[in-house]
Each structure stands twice: as structure tokens, then as C-alpha cells.
Amino acid sequence: MILFGRDKEKTELDGVLHGARKGAGSAVMLWGDPGIGKTALLEYATAAADDFTVLSCRGTRMESGLAFAALHELLWPAADRIDALPAPQAAALHGALGHSGDAADRFLIGVATLTLLSELACAKPVLITVDKADLLDEPTAECLAFVVRRLRTEPVALLFTGHGDPAADGLWELLPGLEVTPLSDGDAGDLVRHDRPGADAESVRRTVRMAAGNPLALRELPSVDEGGAEPGESGERIPVGPLLRRAFGARTARLSPLAQTVLLVAAAEDLGDPHAVREAAAALGAGTAAWDEAVRSGLVLVADGRIRLRTALVAAVVYEEAPFARRQSVHRALARALHGSQGGDLRAWHLAAAADTADEEVAALLEHSARSGWTRGGYASAARALRRAAELSPVPADAARRLALGALAAWGDGQVATARELLDRADRLAEGDAVVRASEGLRGVIEFAHGDQERAHRLLLHATHAVAEPEQAVRLACLAVRAGWSGGSAERQAEALRRLEELGGEGAAAALLPLIKQWWGTGPGTGAPPPADEAFALLGSASWHLIPPAPLAVAWGAEQPLARAYQRELETLRRTGAVSALMLTVPQTATIDIVRGRWTQAAANAADTLRVAEEIGADHAASQCRNTLAWLAALRGDEGTVAELTAKTLELSVPRGVRALTAAAYWNRGMAALFAGRAPEALEVLLRLAEPGHRAAHATFALLAAADTVEAASSAGLCAAGADALRCLQEWARDTGAAWAVAAALRSAALLAEEGAEELFLAALSVPGAADHPFAHARTRLLYGEWLRRARRRTDARVQLAEAAETFQRLGATPLLERSLHEQELTGQRLRRAESYGTGGEPLLTPQEMRVARLGADGLTNREIAAQLLISPRTVGHHLANVFPKLGIVARAELARVDFDNGLRLLG
């Protein structure tokens, strides 16, 4: 293939292909003006990839509204391999491609596509070419964007073309862009002389000047008799776009009206289906003679059983320059040519393109198309179809209902602003609570997930009276309870619980209400909860939303039963493949992992979930992940990361009244200052958690941070300032018997005690279950060791300090490790720090390697691990190949012998 002046672009494409051959996948977006040569570069890459499996698709105007239309085109050569995927993935992909009626989660569809491509690449590398990416249907575009972000260890190359810089497009902003620029005059002249060997020098010069380096213009403009002076001689240069449009317009104008009809039908159909194009053209009077004329003109091409116009620009000119009345007749003819259910969705869009007034029949067809796409995971396409259906609805109530459904679809796609806009439009058309009912209380759900918690509480409670299904009313009331807790309002929490009681009625639901009320309480006198395993099983069987969030469960000392409950839920998610539901579980499990000492696992989970939350615009879930990462950063002494992450959290949470997130951010800042030795600063921050009316005031987090508050007050020499926090801890410990609270209350009392401190420290260390929180237990040892050192009992101090240092070193708690080592040195002990504790070294396993290894130790296969972590099985294998030599093992079965919580030691 001869490409003039494209050495740079060819080198770039050759590099992408070479990387894929070596197992390093990547993707590039070729972008530039129409006719600039992007498709020719795709053809070059395809020709150069003779040792690849090549899959291709292109975006089209008509199919841009049909869910997964382009993905169907892309994957049909590999459709026979879908059934070999893990069952949930196979079901999701079959559903997305319309092979079944199975509902599908869009992230699971992405995982399934990634797995399919990865396994296809086992035989030889895979090249995917996507022409006109800006015209892809949104679900396909989202699926491919998901794949692009996970290509690093795959022998897969993805090449896209588009008109705009991907850096300016939210979906493709992380995709490297390669701008295809105009040819130089020298290269342009070479192209013209190659195409027209007999052209004289003046003709070549004139063409080069007119075309401005655009290869399509260089090829097409010389064939048109401009009949006048060269553009630019009058002093004003005409842009290439209008010139090409005039050139193609002049060529089509020479054809007979019926031959022009053939062109218009092909342009409107846009897919190349010969049956539909020929039948529609015949219905409009264009017979064999018209077809022959159109083909002889060179503007219509018939190849490989498909009908195409010469270029995309020809199609655009033919379609856009045609009067609307002619386009109407063409779209109606195409709609009639689409028979049976196979073309139903496309038929609806052709009729919609022809409609210029309200039409209930067309609106109903679009709604049916939307519901079909929605079921298959095509939320964005469904939202688009429902918006258009609302525009065509003659009755305002029907329009409002369709807009409300469109909002639900947009919400499912993570398009929060679009969902709100559609709800606003629906409210202007409907009466009463019709929109609340049709949208299943969506406005309150959106407000809970992204907005102000007080308003969310109000909207959710109102929606419980409006929605039709009792189960939905219960779910909304549960969210209202969470909104009250999240906003730090005991009053709103209690109000939502009363509404939940009203909805509970009789029977099993009513029996759960005492459990719910007890678990959501954090005040004095709450009393000991029922057995946690039993309670979580009962609550989860009724509605997963009823189980309290992890910080509340930690306060009750029920994090271990909660972890088991979430483990059961994760096992269900693995079976059902509801990947997006992981957003509800992973931030909770990360909290539990931190208090249980599994920091590497927590960091990896939070980082990955943060990425997904940001992808779908789940602001509060993202902030929860940032708080988890900031908590770990505070424990590890990374104050810069604490400041960065908490600033982002507060930016989002404070204006929206999400006190749970605000309080967690304040707690993280307080811990960072405390562990860095700035006790007065830490105390100033931590006291705000219990200050009535403060933006960070929150009962649960004030309780969890009480021991830090007492330690900050003691270290700052302001013991009286910690008295309230100590009293809060002691009351909670007495009422609930939670091991962490009992130990923390005893430790805190020791710090403030004038006498009897040693007995309190020893009692704290001996609380049954206290060692299950290794960081907190090591802190008690450190504080006791410091007390012993000050009491000149150096030998005893060294024992406690050494135990504390070992735990801090294993966890990576650098500030307190350094403090422990310093205290040991103050006892007169000489330490060789690097040899004794390895300070400053890198963790043996990366966070992702740790997660893969843990799941492998649980007996999961590579495919099951990949599905859970949203990566490919090949990437799982890559990580395991790194893990085995690091751990000194040679077989997968040996992973079960690794003690992941205590230094990655091999058990006997």
C-alpha cells in the first residue's frame, strides 16, 4: 500500500503492532479532518498485521442509537467462542449481542469482552480496528473504553479513528491520540502525479493549492470542472470541507433523479444491507437502470455483499443536502423494507427520523426498542431512545413517563447530569407524583448517591408514599435511614426508621425492625446487639440495604460477622456476575480489612473501586474510597497523600452535608497529625467530630476516633480536653461489650490516669479479641512501653516496644515504627534498624499481586479471579508468575500455606 507522507504515522502503528506481538497491548486514536487519510492508515495497519487475528467495526449514523450494534459487528467472527467463557460472562455477552433475553451488567459485558479477546489472543495477537469511533453506539464505546484501560499485559492492539482530539472527549480522554495532519505540498504533488500520471505541472499545482494537503481532496477535486478562477485568486481561500462538498455535490447533480434516489437511500440506510437498500429504492421507483447509473458514476460501490457510497463525505453530502421531505420518504421506505423482529429497533429509528410531528405509534416503537436495549445493558442507548420517544409523544403524561424512564436508564449508565435533566423535563409535563412513581423514586436515590443528604432524606421518604411496589418503598426507606446516618442526624435517622416500621406491616418484616433500630443506634444505653451473624443473616435475607455500613459494624465490634456477610454477598456476585454491585460492597470490606490488619488488600480494593466509581460518576462511593486510602496514608505517614485525598473529599462532601464522609476526612487528618508528633494540631481537628453543629460532627466517627482524641489530649498536655472522649468510650464499652471499645477505653484511661496506669494498660492488652485489631493492639504496647521507659523499667519496656515494632513493621506503619525504635534506643538498646526491621524497603508483593494471591489461595481459578478484579485471565496469570518466585513457591496449591496477615510466611 502506497501512503505518501505518512512515515511518522506508519512508524507509530508499526510500534503498536510490535508491542502487541510482545504481549504489551495498547491503543491509539487516529484523529483529523474528514478525508485526511485515517481509514487508509487503518488499512495499512491491517495489511501489516498478517500474523494477527483482525476484528473490525465502524460507527454509523443509523446504528448509533442501537445498543451494542458495533460490538455485534466486531465480535461476530468470534461468536462461537462465547460459550466457552465463564457462565455469567457468556450470558452477559449473549444478552448484549441480542442472542438471548438475559439481563446484563455493563461492566460484566466489558469483562466478558476483555476475556474473549484475551483468550482469542492465546493463538496469535489480535488487532481491532474501529473506524468512525465518534459514531459508535454508546454501549459499544463504553465497552471498548473499558477494554482499552486494561490492555497492558494483553497481546491486543486497538486502533480507532475519529474527527476530534481524544483528550477533549471524556470517554476517550486517556487514549493516546495521533493527529493525522495535512500532507506537505511535495507529498501532495507526488500523490496527484501517482493518481494522474498524465497531469501537467499547472494542473498539479492548482490541485495541490486547492486541496490544502487533504488526500481525499487531492483525489476528488481534479475530476470536477470548477469552471472559473482558482480559489484564492480573488484573495479569499475556500476551506477544503466546502470545496469537497461542492465537488461531490456537482457529481451527484449530474445524475438522473432516480439515480440520486439510489444514492440517498444508501446514505440514509448507512449499513450497506443490499436487501433493505434495493427494496426501499425500488419502492421509490428506482429500478435497474437507476442502479446501473449510480454504480457507473463511481459514487456507489458494491463489494463483499455490501453497498457503500464512495466515501463517508459523499454520504454526508447526499444526505444533508437532500430536502427533508425526500429524506422522510426514504426513511419510511427503509422502515417498510425492514421485516420481522430482526429489524424492529432499526425500523423505529427510521420512522423517528421521518417524523416531524407527534406520533404515538413511533414513540411506542422507540420505547420498546429502549426497553430491549436496557435489558441487554445498553443504558445509554435506552436513554437516547426514550428521550426521542418523549419528543414524539402526543400526550404530555406519556412524554413525562418516558422521560422518567429515560432518567432511570441514564442513571444506570452513570450519566447523573442527564438523569437529572430528564427528571426536570418530566416534572414540567406531569402532575402530582407521576414522575416519582415512574422513576421509582430516582431523584431521591440520585441525591443520596451524589447530593445533599438532608434533601435526599426528604425526597426518599416522600417517594415511599408514591411508588407502586411495596418492596421499592422499603428499599427507599432503608436509603433514607442511611441518608440520616450519613448526614449525621439522629433525628432524621429516627424518622426514617419510623417510616420503615409503618411499611413493615406484619410478619417477617415487622420482626426485623427491632434489629434494625438496635444496629443503627450509637447513643448511650443502646444495649448489646443480638448475635451479629444471626442479625446479618436476617437483615440480608430481607434487603441487603438494611445491613449497617462498615464503620457502624466496627463500632459494634461486629466487623468479623460483617466480613462473613459480605463474603457471602461477593460469592453471590461471582455467580450472578452483577459486577457493578461491587460498588456497594468493596468500600465496606476495605474498612474491615484495615481494622483487621490487611492493609495491602484494603489499598488495592479501594484503589480499584475508586477507578470504577470515577468512571461511572459515583461521587460518594469515590469519596469513601479516597477516605480509605487517606486512612492508610495517615497510618503509613504519607501526609501529602492525606492532604490531597481529604481535600478532594471535603470539596464534595461539605457542600452536600455528607457528614460521615466529612468526619472520616477529619479523622484521617487528625491521625496524620497525631502520628507525625503534632498532638495539639491533631486535638484541634479531632475535637470537631463531637462538636454539636460542626460540619464534621458525627456520632459514629466521634466514637471510633475517641481513643485518638484522648491520646492527642494526653500528648498535648491538655488531659481535660480528652475527658469527654474517654467518657464516651467507657459508656459504649459498658453498653456493648465490644472488644475494641473495652480495650480502647482502658488504654485511654491509662493515659489520663494519675495512678494505676499499669493495671489499665495490662487490662487493655488482655481483653479477649483485642489482638484482632493488630494496629490498635500494637499502639497499646507502644504506649505501655513508653510508660515503662519513663518509669525506668527499661527491660520490661523493651519487650513491649519490640512487640509493637514488629507489628508496625509488618503493617507498614512507618511513623509508629520509627517511634517504637526511637523509644527502644532511649532504653539504651542499640538497634541495627535496616537489618532488624527493613525500614524503607518496598513491599514484597504489589497490592494487585497480593489480591490475586489471596484469591488464588481461596481456590479461585484465573477466570474467577479475573471476573472479580475486572481484569483478564491472562493478566491474572502474569501476576501469579511474579508472585510465585517472590514467595518462594512453585505451585498454585502452595498459596494456601501462605500467612498473608503475618509477613507472608509459609505455614507448615
Image (spheres, rainbow, N blue to C red):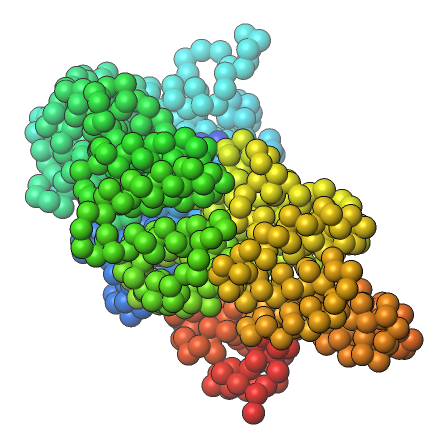
Dividing the picture into quadrants, the one containing residue 201 is top right
Q: Position of residue 52 (x, y in %)?
A: 43, 63
The residue at the point 55 percent across, 73 percent down is: 769
Quadrant housing the C terminus: bottom right
Quick check: 355 above or below 889? above
Q: Is residue 754 left or right of residue 312?
A: right
The residue at the point 67 percent across, 46 percent down is: 686
Q: Identify which residue, 403 or 862, lies in the foreground.
A: 403
The extreme front residue here reads 755
Q: Is residue 334 left or right of residue 703?
A: left
Dividing the picture into quadrants, the one containing residue 265 is top left
Q: Is residue 32 left or right of residue 121?
A: right
Q: Identify which residue, 677 or 792, lies in the foreground.
A: 792
The extreme bottom residue here reads 908
Dividing the picture into quadrants, the one containing residue 61 is top left
The extreme top residue here reads 234
How many circles with numbers are drawn on the protein? 0
Whether residue 686 is visible to the viewer of this picture, yes or no, is: yes
Q: Identify which residue, 531 or 36, lies in the foreground.
A: 531
Quick check: 373 above or below 246? below
Q: Identify which residue, 280 or 695, lies in the foreground.
A: 695
The residue at the point 31 percent across, 41 percent down is: 498
Q: Position of residue 43 (x, y in %)?
A: 43, 49
Q: Position of residue 335 (x, y in %)?
A: 13, 33
Whether residue 65 is visible to the viewer of this picture, yes or no, is: no
Q: Position of residue 496 (x, y in %)?
A: 34, 40
The residue at the point 50 percent across, 26 percent down is: 211
